[in-house]
Image: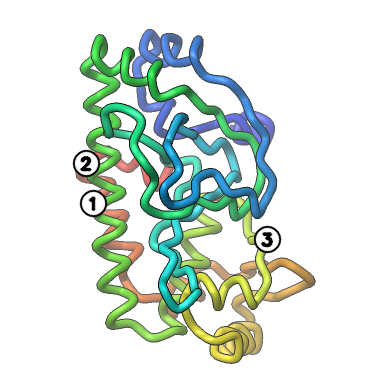
Amino acid sequence: MDAMALDRHNDLLERLEEADRRLLGHKLEDVTLEAGSVIYQPGNTIDYCYFPMGAALCSFFVEMDEGIAVETILVGREGALGGVVSHGNLPAFARANVLHGGLFRRMALRDLEEIKRGNPAVAHLLSRYADCMMAQVFQSIACNAVHTIEQRAAKWLVAAVDRMGRPSVTMTQEQLASMMGVGRSYASRVLQRFKRDGLLRTRRGAIEVINREGLSERACSCNDHVNGHFKRVLGGLYEA
């Protein structure tokens, strides 16, 4: 797939049969969102379902009473966010942020609900994807409780570049630390070790992975467990 086609590609939409994909296509609209854009705040009514295209990447954050926000899961071109299986316009629980800007396709939930009612294949696909999202949440909880900062940072960077299909992640060390719920000094030391070992390099506002396999060896196995669940439930969609 060439770069232009990839930039307009969402693996979840591509998994639909052609007729169902055309049906959704009539209701989808293109929007471009920049890094840092907030799609939902906790308590916001969810009016749209968003499908990240290409390298567009989002994350869900849970805001704590201590004033920090901890990342739970990533969503890229393998999926969707906002009202995937819920019926009706419900409030958001977590904050949804754009981490890497790009093209999104979005659909009003009222239109998506109408399509799901008339097309069991669409409803079934989104329900299976929601199961995979829940698997990511479960794995994230376990990972944050057990694994080291180094393992978690390596895991996150590998997952990000795999979803984006490119090695550079637009992110500062402060942002990475905040997402992981650790101090900046901890994140900085981990990144310095990765740089020293030739796994990545940093530049202003970005982290570039130069040895994905080596970085993957430093990560915990959480990505593998989530990937395995996607394989069983969605036939390898996560790896597309």
Residue ID at (37%, 42%): 91
**Distance from Cα at disc 3 to Cα at disc 1:** 28 Å
Quick one: which residue is furthest to the right in this view? 204
Q: Are marks 3 and 1 in contact (CB under 8 Å)?
A: no
In the shown orientation, is residue 232 left or right of residue 215? left
Q: Which residue is mark 2?
A: 233
Q: Which residue is mark 1?
A: 229
Question: Residue 170 has which mark?
Answer: 3
- The residue mark sitting in front, 3 or 1, is 3
SS of the residue under disc 2: helix
SS of the residue under disc 3: loop
Residue ID at (46%, 22%): 108
The amino acid on which the numbered mark 3 sits, given as a three-letter code, is Thr
The amino acid on which the numbered mark 1 sits, given as a three-letter code, is His
Crowding at dot 1, Cα within 10 Å, few <14 / some 14-19 / many 20+, comes out as: some
**Distance from Cα at disc 3 to Cα at disc 2:** 30 Å
Nearest the eye: 185 or 214: 185
**Distance from Cα at disc 2 to Cα at disc 1:** 6 Å
In the rendered image, residue 95, in percent from the top left (x then y), is placed at 47, 54
Q: Earlier in the sequence, mark 3 or mark 2?
A: 3
In the rendered image, residue 30, in percent from the top left (x then y), is placed at 62, 25
